[in-house]
Image (cartoon, rainbow, N blue to C red):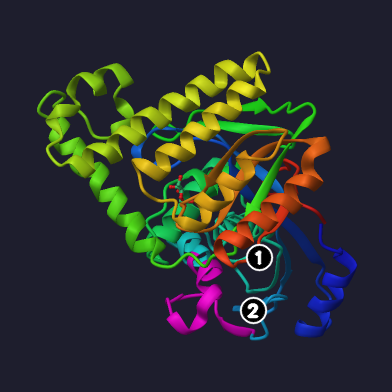
Amino acid sequence: MANLHELTQRFLSVYGESHEQISIFHAPGRVNLIGEHTDYNGGYVFPAALTFGTTLLIRKRDDNQLGLASTNFDEHKHLPISPIVYDEADDWMNYPKGIVNELQQRGTVFENGYDLLFHGEIPNGAGLSSSASIEVVTAYGLLTMAGYPIDTVQIALLSQKSENEFNGVQCGIMDQFAVANGKKDHAILLMCDTLEYDLVPFNSGDYQLVIGNTNKRRGLVDSKYNERRSQCEQAVQDLKAAFPELTLLGQLSLEDFNANKHLIKDEIVRKRAEHVVEEIDRVLQSMKVLQTNDLAAFGQLMNASHDSLRDLYEVTGDELDAMVAAARQVKGVLGSRMTGAGFGGCTVSLVHKDSIETFKSEVGRNYTAATGLTPDFYVCTIGNGVERLV
Ligand code: GLA
């Protein structure tokens, strides 16, 4: 957790003194435990909020300017709070700008401007949802400051819309939803088609979740992500021959899918669809085994998820595969898989608490030997969704 006193000093050094109070908000990053590339197919996901994320300090201004600054970057600027226009040169600022724009599109009226200082603790491009964290904390903070009621499901939806439309990234709902609705020591079972969800206590006993950052920059992730999305849409089109009402792969049971998958003409498209339908089933199996605290069985499902993302969905790549292979060799590891969109980013492993130091050194050594890259590891505690701190 960031040092709030230091952040307040930093805020004052950027924006100066004022008679208005500074309010402080926090939104986490997220890790997805299982259910990958299922959200935009209307299936189940099982993410959890992290304890680190984005802290946002906000103070009301007397005029209609919006101040944007971050402790992670040098540049800061003021712009009119309306109208908001996307500008590539604004880089990360396009995330909060998109939210300010989306809120106003939905009828939020800002009677005055605000100064915002962001402090991000999520490594950039690691696939732990740094952008969703910025979006959700901005929406929550500004709505609170302007005196509007808070609905964290709506905040997730408007944040996703902003990322889709303002920032042009075709993400699903999982990241924003987890960041907005997470709860300490719980994972979220979310049905992405209906947005029904359950907070499931995640009792990992003697085991801990360890995130491994491959530190591989995720090149071309957007175009490959969009390609996977359209392959899933293609599979739906083909399956409509048997299910005319079908709009999303997640609406099919594994049995119905298996009995009809021959209708998908393209072999690659069929593999993609197979991953999606089986992965949704793995999330449901996970709920069963976690009910009896069978962590070994959950670890097996994590492994099966990664193998399917590698062989059928083809979104892992050498670095994630190398890290997962190294993790699975360590005694005390129940399961290991990539998490997030893939093509680089992070893995998540379920590791016995006595094996964590060995895990870090052995996986680190073998991963570096295989890829030449130096990884980072974070032992993960499940934290709360977006909240006000001060
Ligand atoms: C990214 C997207 C999510 C989800 C995952 C894959 O994190 O933002 O919506 O699709 O990839 O599960």
Residue at numbered disc 1: 374
- Point 40% across, 51% down: residue: 315
Q: Amino acid at mark 1?
A: Thr
Front residue (pair 98, 256): 256
Please indicate, yes or no, whether residue 35 appears anywhere in the rendered image. yes
Q: Is residue 80 magenta?
A: yes
Ligand 1 under 8 Å from disc 1 Cβ: no
**Residue 87 pos. (x, y %):** 43, 80
- Magenta segment range? 76-98
Residue 342 versus residue 318: which sits nearer the camera? 318
Compared across the picture, whether 310 is left or right of 109 comes to: left
Residue drawn at x 73%, y 75% is 71
SS class, disc 2: strand
Q: Are marks 1 and 2 in contact (CB under 8 Å)?
A: no
Residue 67's tag is 2
Q: Quadrant of the C terminus?
A: bottom right
Per the model, the C-alpha gap separating discs 1 and 2 is 36 Å
Task: Tell which residue pokes out farthest to the right in this image.
Answer: 5
Q: Amino acid at mark 2?
A: Gly
In the drawing, does residue 82 fall left or right of residue 229? right
Which x, y percent locates residue 218?
48, 64
Q: Residue at x 71, y 50 (%)?
A: 362
